[in-house]
Image: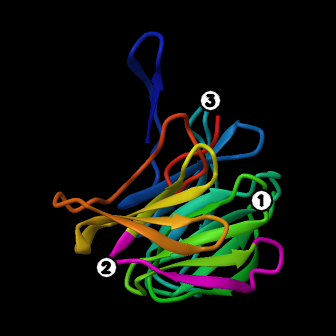
Amino acid sequence: VAVVDLKEGKVVRAITGGMETEGIEFSADGKRILVTNEADENVSVHEISTGRLVKKISTKKYGNRPRGIKMSPDGKTYVASLEYGNKLVVLDGKFKVVKVVTTGEVPYGLAFDRKGERLFVALSKGGALQVLDAKTYQEIARIPTGKRCWHFTFTPDDAHILVACGKSDEVVVIDANSLQPVKRIPDKEIPWGIVTYPKSAGSLDVPQ
């Protein structure tokens, strides 16, 4: 992971995670970074100022290939998806696994809504966006999408969710209130990730 000084436009530090680094997230205090290391089957925690490894959390016994990772809006928990375990692992503020949640098939990108009431998970092979209660982790809905939907974002007004579905070459638009698909936008470039501006809640971004 490269730490870049945006004013100087140069790399000031390199943080060494593990093999096939996939997702990153900042700690609640902004002093540490959490990294999902797909091939090493772990989540590593590093001190940003020095690059020092603080902790390594093995995910092997829960499932294979950690992918996405997100902090809850209240900063109390972190949730990581295990692609070939059909699971989520929930970490507390001390980076300890406190809960394991079963998901649909092949979870990938994930994000909380702005209020932290719901957790959304893109089911890559399941062909759906799964919606969970962010406190109980019980399923609220499973919204049909397309094939291999990897990442998604809310629109800045929180009214819709845009889901990038790479293997069906489309972006699926979902009404965030009714939780129903309302539009499909063709995209022949195998869409993988998606963000909006102004920045909004999503699997690859956080609100401003």
- Residues in magenta? 134-149
What is the distance, in whole Å, between disc 1 and disc 3 at their CAs? 28 Å
Please tell me the numbered disc located at residue 147: 2
- Taking depth in this image into account, of 70 and 59 the one nearest to the observer is 70
Residue occupied by mark 1? 116
- Taking depth in this image into account, of 186 and 136 the one nearest to the observer is 186
Q: Is residue 62 left or right of residue 114?
A: left
Q: Amino acid at mark 1?
A: Gly
Q: Secondary structure at mark 2?
A: loop
Percent across and percent down for residue 177 are 67, 67
Q: Is residue 151 left or right of residue 63?
A: left
Q: Mark 2 or mark 3, which is nearer to you?
A: 2
- Near mark 1 (Cα within 10 A), the count class, few <14, some 14-19 or many ≥20, is some
What is the distance, in whole Å, between disc 2 and disc 1 at their CAs? 27 Å
Q: Amino acid at mark 2?
A: Lys
Q: Amino acid at mark 3?
A: Ser
What is the distance, in whole Å, between disc 2 and disc 3 at their CAs? 40 Å
Please tell me the numbered disc located at residue 49: 3
Residue at 48% from the left image edge and 73% from the top image edge: 181
- Let me know if residue 138 is in the magenta part: yes
Query: Does label 2 or label 1 sit earlier along the sequence?
Result: 1
17 versus 1 height, above or below: below
What is the total number of numbered labels drawn onto the structure image? 3
Query: Does label 1 or label 3 sit earlier along the sequence?
Result: 3
Query: Does label 2 or label 3 sit earlier along the sequence?
Result: 3
